[in-house]
């Protein structure tokens, strides 16, 4: 059983039950009606992978990979701690992580966008994990959990958590998000975070930012990035990523003391190689000095980077590794923090 308070209301849910109080504003990578239509198709019996393939494989190949690629859960082997206590996934999206976790432990999938949560639970029923998965359709900031979690997964969410709201400065919201997670972890529990590196080499060399779709803004220090984004006339900047030292400082300020970084190549979304940093990045530098990195892509639309760009990345990783600093320029991080 999961117990929590939503605003002033105390709620308890058994595995397989769902609480839904979604908000209108929110992160969407496909129109609501399209996704609701897909959910109806799945609920009428069509296998979800087949339905997703028919709808997106040709029309939206990047989205199709994001939803279905087995690489989405590659971090389980390298980064997850060995525990099977209750897990929470915040911003569960299409449920790639939550459903896979539910094969081995009870999971709460928290996702504020209603149709995304409907997809997660419909696909969980087909995968035979519905009784292990509790759905909560709400903003994480509106929920106070009584049940402590052994594991909290936040994959591709910290960068977005300040967006789609206007009460709090987005970066302050990100700091509050990490502090709230720290409070809701059981003693000895772990946060697993997946996020792009603000200083990822590909971004410094001019690859568009995964959130903004343009180069040379998201990789700037936040005050300057805000200024440059405002100058484009698209309103205030809402999505922020961080370098390794910045992210570590934020995690320590939130109360985390044991923090392990991993470099994810080509990124945390579809990782093919996940390499632990080791002490001061030595393990990742040693790996980069001896290996070719997997081909990287534009993380905004999934398009491959051309061979010349790829070679430029490879040569620079090597040179930076020889100086012992290449870990600062990995494209994405996984972080395990407790
Ligand atoms: C880029 S998507 C990542 C989805 C999924 N974790 C994945 O790896 O594909 C970001 C998700 O964070 C969710 N999100 C953003 N702000 C949130 C909040 N305050 N509380 C809970 N979820 C939130 C969005 O609804 C969205 O599904």
Image (tube, grey):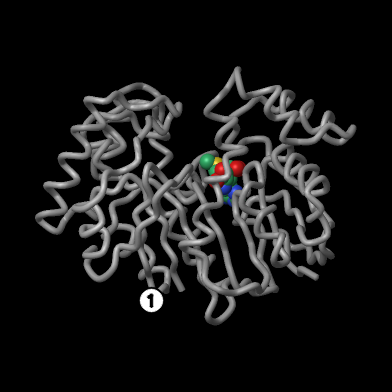
The answer to which quarter of the image holds residue 70 is top right
Left or right of 72: which side holds 280? left
* Image location (x, y in percent) of residue 71: 52, 45
Left or right of 89: which side holds 78? left
* Image location (x, y in percent) of residue 212: 39, 30
Left or right of 184: which side holds 327? left
The answer to which quarter of the image holds residue 85 is bottom right
Q: Residue at position x 55%, y 81% from top? A: 187
Q: Residue at position x 74%, y 24% from top? A: 33
Q: Residue at position x 21%, y 58% from top? A: 285
Q: Is residue 66 above or below residue 247?
A: above
**Residue at the outermost right position:** 44
Q: Nearer the viewer, residue 283 or 122?
A: 283
* Quarter of the rendered image showing ligand 1: top right
Q: Is residue 86 above or below residue 135?
A: below
Left or right of 237: which side holds 309? left
- Label 1 CB sits under 8 Å from any ligand 1 atom: no
Q: Nearer the viewer, residue 143 or 315?
A: 315
* Mark 1 residue crowding within 10 angstroms, few (<14) / some (14–19) / many (20+): few
Image quadrant holding the N terminus, namely bottom right
* Image location (x, y in percent) of residue 232: 32, 22
* Image location (x, y in percent) of residue 175: 42, 59
The answer to which quarter of the image holds residue 126 is top right
Q: Nearer the viewer, residue 292 or 220?
A: 292
Residue 12 visible: yes
Q: Residue at position x 74%, y 30% from top? A: 50
**Secondary structure category for the residue under label 1:** loop
Residue 222 visible: no
Query: Mark 1 = which residue?
Result: 257
The mark total stands at 1
**Residue at the outermost top position:** 59
């Amino acid at each position: 059983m999961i117990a929590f308070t939503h605003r002033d209301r105390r709620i308890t849910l058994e595995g397989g039950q769902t609480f839904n109080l979604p908000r209108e504003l929110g992160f969407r990578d496909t129109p609501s009606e399209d996704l609701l239509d897909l959910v109806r198709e799945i609920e009428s019996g069509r296998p979800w992978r087949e339905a997703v393939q028919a709808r997106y494989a040709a029309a939206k190949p990047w989205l199709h990979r994001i939803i279905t690629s087995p690489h989405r859960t590659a971090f389980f082997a390298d980064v997850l701690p060995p525990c099977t206590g209750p897990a929470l996934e915040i911003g569960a999206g299409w449920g790639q992580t939550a459903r896979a976790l539910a094969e081995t432990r009870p999971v709460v999938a928290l996702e504020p966008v209603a149709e995304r949560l409907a997809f997660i639970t419909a696909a969980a029923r087909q995968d035979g994990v519905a009784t292990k998965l509790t759905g909560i359709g709400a903003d994480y900031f509106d929920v106070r959990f009584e049940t402590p979690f052994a594991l909290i997964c936040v994959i591709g969410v910290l960068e977005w958590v300040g967006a789609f709201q206007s009460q709090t400065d987005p970066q302050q919201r990100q700091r509050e998000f990490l502090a709230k997670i720290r409070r809701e972890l059981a003693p000895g529990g772990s946060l697993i975070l997946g996020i792009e590196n603000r200083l990822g080499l590909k971004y410094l060399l001019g690859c568009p930012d995964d959130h903004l779709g343009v180069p040379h803004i998201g990789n700037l220090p936040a005050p300057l990035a805000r200024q440059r984004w405002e100058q484009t006339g698209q309103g205030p900047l809402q999505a922020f990523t961080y370098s390794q030292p910045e992210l570590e400082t934020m995690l320590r300020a939130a109360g985390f003391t044991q923090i392990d970084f991993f470099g994810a190549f080509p990124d945390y979304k579809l990782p093919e190689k996940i390499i632990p940093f080791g002490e001061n990045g030595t393990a990742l530098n040693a790996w980069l000095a001896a290996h070719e990195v997997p081909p990287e892509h534009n993380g905004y639309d999934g398009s491959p980077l051309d061979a010349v760009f790829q070679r430029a990345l490879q040569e620079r990783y090597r040179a930076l590794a020889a100086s012992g600093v290449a870990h600062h320029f990995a494209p994405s991080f996984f972080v395990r923090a407790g």
